[in-house]
Amino acid sequence: MTRIPKLLADGFVFAEGPRWRGERLWFSDMHGEAVRTVDLRGRLETVAELPGREPSGLGFLPDGTLLVVSMLEPEILRIDGRNVTVHANLSPLVSDRCNDMVVDGRGNAYVGTFPPVSDPRGVLVLVEPDGSARIVAEDITFPNGCVVTQGGRRLIVAESLGRRFTEFDIAPDGSLTGRRVFAECAPYGPDGICIDAEGALWAAMPLAHEFQRIAPGGEILERIPMAERLAIACTLGGPELRTLFLLTSKELPGESIKGTHDATIHIVEVDIPGTGSP
């Protein structure tokens, strides 16, 4: 079956970190230095302007407070209405930038680092609801998109330069144990991911210019090509969790795209809904 994505919104510098909540898609406009929302009619709102910062991964605490990765510092910000405060400073733990993040139902945030390509061994940092932080997984080959599944009992991380998805069990204290391969995906390097009710991942494959639905073990079940556009991130949402939001760009993030507004959000309806878990 060929699915034809429909343009929902455009004009962003670099859209990242999509999360569906409250009948809206929340996302970071990374180099646009803002967090925004869009509804299914394409109506846009700016949640917060973050001048001088590069927002990336998003998530929500149980009380609805928005958490945002500020990549460069690196810090996790809390955004509550108009108030922007620092939830956690990760610089004592990591020397790299930070990137994507998933927040589970207890308010535990799992944050991946953004290591250099020359030494792509990154880590996952657990930030607890009180802002305390510790490293819970090491030697992740450029960690990227993460999902929490199985009722909060498991975490899957995309290893962009490892060309695989790695799965962990989540212990009661938030630690990660039982590391194993969920799926190999070479030669593709995954970016943002989400999971559906059958346990398959939707994954953005930037340099392949497509989104792929991948079963445990690695079988590619479906592809959604995006022509010349880079596939950056995706999530399932909408009233029945069957709307797949596809975030794309013409270029990878970096200084060269600042001042451009070529990032887009497309949507497509899929057969298998999401789980409601980030």
Image (spheres, rainbow, N blue to C red):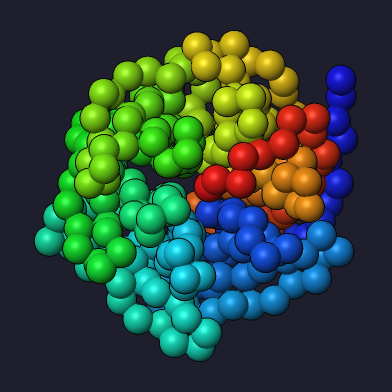
Q: Is residue 181 above or below residue 250?
A: above
In depth, the one of 230 and 218 nearer the eye is 218
Q: Is residue 127 above or below residue 140?
A: below
Q: Is residue 164 above or below residue 138?
A: above
Q: Is residue 123 visible?
A: no
Residue 74 coordinates in the image, percent (x, y): 28, 63
In depth, the one of 139 and 261 nearer the eye is 139
Which residue occupies 73% across, 63% down? 23
Q: Is residue 8 left or right of residue 146?
A: right
Q: Is residue 130 left or right of residue 30?
A: left
Which residue occupies 82% across, 65% down? 42
Which residue occupies 45% across, 64% down? 62
Residue 7 coordinates in the image, percent (x, y): 83, 51
Which quadrant would residue 156 be assigned to in this image?
top left
Residue 9 coordinates in the image, percent (x, y): 78, 60
Q: Is residue 37 visible?
A: yes
Q: How many marks?
A: 0
